[in-house]
Amino acid sequence: MKRELDAADQALSKLYEGVEKGILELDATLQTRAQGHKAKRVAILTEMAGLRRRQDLPLAGLSAAKVHQFCQALKNVLLGSYKAFAKRYLRALVSDIRVAGNVVTITGSDVALAAAVAGTGALDQRVPRLGTGWLPDLGSNQGPAD
């Protein structure tokens, strides 16, 4: 991919150099060729970024035993007396819960789950996007409107 990227960069460079030196006339055909090389370059960069992202995922070190152990520990935490911690952990792992009749579907980030199982992820500290428990008391927001 690096060679393909270099080839696309070199082709663009040669086209630009030809225009600068007056060898090539900047017409619609040349513009189309330059746009084709640019599009190829962007596609290669996008594919390279996707490959890098996949390499950075901590999924490689996960085994069935580790996942099972994590599930047991998470179950103990969620059912235990540490309710605030359990809620934060769920918010870090779960992005959506949908209930349709007797079916509950829970979705979340594979990367966040893999990081949590591997023990490399920190809890996400985002403000909740949806839910009723994000502002449990009125706090200091009681001042008059300006």
Image: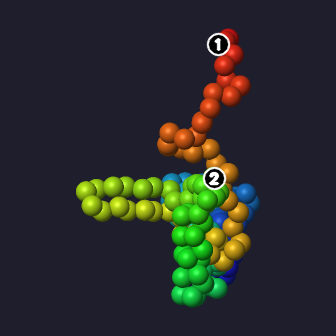
- Sort mark 2 into few (<14), some (14-19) or many (20+) by Cα contacts within 10 Å: few
Please indicate, yes or no, whether residue 140 appears anywhere in the rendered image: yes
- Rendering coords of residue 36 (x, y %): 53, 64
Q: Is residue 46 left or right of residue 56?
A: left
Q: Quadrant of residue 110?
A: bottom right
Residue at (56, 59) in percent of width and height? 90
Residue type, numbered disc 2: Ala
The N terminus lies in which quarter of the figure?
Answer: bottom right
Q: Judging from the image, what secondary structure is the residue with disc 1 in?
A: loop
In primary-sequence order, the first of circles 1 and 2 is: 2
> Could you tell me residue 111's position as x and y percent?
59, 69
Circle 2 SS class: helix
Residues 24 and 44: in front is 44
Residue on which the image places disc 2: 84
Q: Quadrant of residue 50?
A: bottom right
Name the residue that disc number 1 marks: 145
Q: Compared to 67, does 141 lie above or below?
A: above
**Residue in the foreground of this view, choosing between 107 and 68:** 68
Q: Farthest residue toward the left?
A: 101
Q: Nearer the viewer, residue 39 or 30?
A: 39
Most foreground residue, 34 or 82:
82
